[in-house]
Image: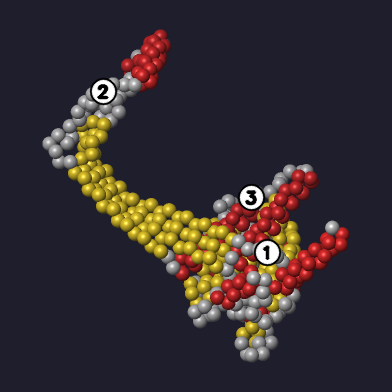
Amino acid sequence: MLKPICCGICSFLVGASVFCSVPALAESPAGAQNIISETNEVSAHAAPAAVQTRDSSEMVQEMIDSFLASVGLREGANPTKKNKHVYTAVETVRVNVSNPDYAKFRVTAYDRAYAAALGAFIEAQGVKTATDTLSKAFTDNSTDAATFKEELSTGRSNLSAMLDKAIALGDAKLSTMLQEEGIDPNQFNAAPPDQKKLLLSRSILKRTIDTASKTLGGVSIAQTFFAEDEAGEGAVGIVLVYSPSIEGVAEALKAGKRPAITATGKPLHELLPLEEPAKLYDMLGTRLLVDENGPVLVSFGQWSNSYQGTSKTLAAEHRNAAYDQANAMANSELSSFLNQSFTMKNEAQKGDILENVAVLSGKTGMTSEQESKAIVDIVRKQAAMQTNAYLQGAVKIRQWRYVTPQGHKVVGVVKAFSFASIQDAKKTFSKEQASDRQKNEASARSGSVVMDLDTF
């Protein structure tokens, strides 16, 4: 008997079509909650009404908070929930929705959000911190500390002498030309540069370097969220989830083995809105689901065709190139789930500097003292992510096209990867080898599918 639950983010948004996935819970024969039904019962619901005074980032953050509350999770480690680790991130889309490349920037905002959430997760697992403090002091209290002595030249190179002659010749000719025009050349004479002598210097700088690195699989997207505010500014949010059981699925699939989960569910065409491009537009990343054969990893890739011309030939070429990008993204998402290496380095520097200098003005010849104070506040961040996996059995189950209400032409690819598809690929490859031998608006939305948060 299915018992629907509301994620707390379902209501109508005025003037916009919105989508939200609300899972359902079912009791297994053993009496435990069967999240397969929660994952597989996909239905369309309205997202929360957006208060128009909020910006898109706030709208997305509120949807994330409501979603986590609805599934009983909090950001960070959840030891009582099969040791799940949940991290979220919100990133703004760096162009307005009116920009013809908005859909592309929307995808790159997702990439940045994923990297930010993954970085927070890796950092929480352990960070190596190194700190060094440098303190320097210098004082010149000599009686002639502020006295400037004329420096005598000991000679010049031939090149330096030639340059001086060339400058002098040019200066003489230019002065003559200025005089012919009734302009006094003297008013353009260059003053000697100011000279400075350091009298006192004191500084203390503290530098902290945090580094973290980890190689793991089994990081999946539980849900994605999107919003555009009244001004046309967009934001993307993700909920990233990891658990040892999810990593176990990744390890098994990477090795071409059946995951140690016996649960089964409905076929993918019943779980996913494959015939509804508007919903697929709001699906990015991976979802770990359960179909009739067991655990299956589904990845969503998309890109945009920005061609604005009238040539059908060129339009087709640009569309095909966008499909290639979407397909590459779908493969990359699968690879990320199976195995990825993440390295992060944050360097922070802070402190203060005090300097007292004597300055000889080149223009007036007068000497004065100047004092300068400065606060050092520098942060440098660097993150690198690399994925590597052999994808035998990754099957394209849908290729779609969608034109957004703003006119953006988006294309996408949906791929599935499971033990069953790996086995099918091996069988097909074997048959082929034998054959060869014989022959030779303001809106806020969430993705319409949520990953299985209780089983995994």
Mark 3 nearby-residue class (10 Å; few <14, some 14–19, many ≥20): some
Where's the N terminus, which quadrant? bottom right
How does the figure colour the protein chain or chains? secondary structure
Residue sitting nearer the eye, 332 or 199: 332
Q: Is residue 336 above or below residue 232?
A: below
Whether residue 56 is visible: no
Q: Secondary structure at mark 1?
A: loop
Residue in view at x 30 percent, y 56 percent: 133
Mark 2 nearby-residue class (10 Å; few <14, some 14–19, many ≥20): few
Residue in view at x 49 percent, y 60 percent: 343
Residue 251, percent from left and from top = 61, 72
Residue 428, percent from left and from top = 79, 67
For this orientation, the residue located farthest to the bottom is 30
Corner quadrant of residue 196: top left
Residue 115, percent from left and from top = 53, 61
For badge 2, the amino acid type reads Thr
Marks 1 and 3: in contact by CB < 8 Å? no
Q: Is residue 414 above or below residue 158?
A: below
| C-alpha gap between disc 3 and disc 2 | 63 Å
Residue that carries the numbered disc 3 in the rendered image: 101
Residue in view at x 66 percent, y 65 percent: 299
Marks 2 and 3: in contact by CB < 8 Å? no
Residue that carries the numbered disc 1 in the rendered image: 391
Q: Secondary structure at mark 3?
A: loop
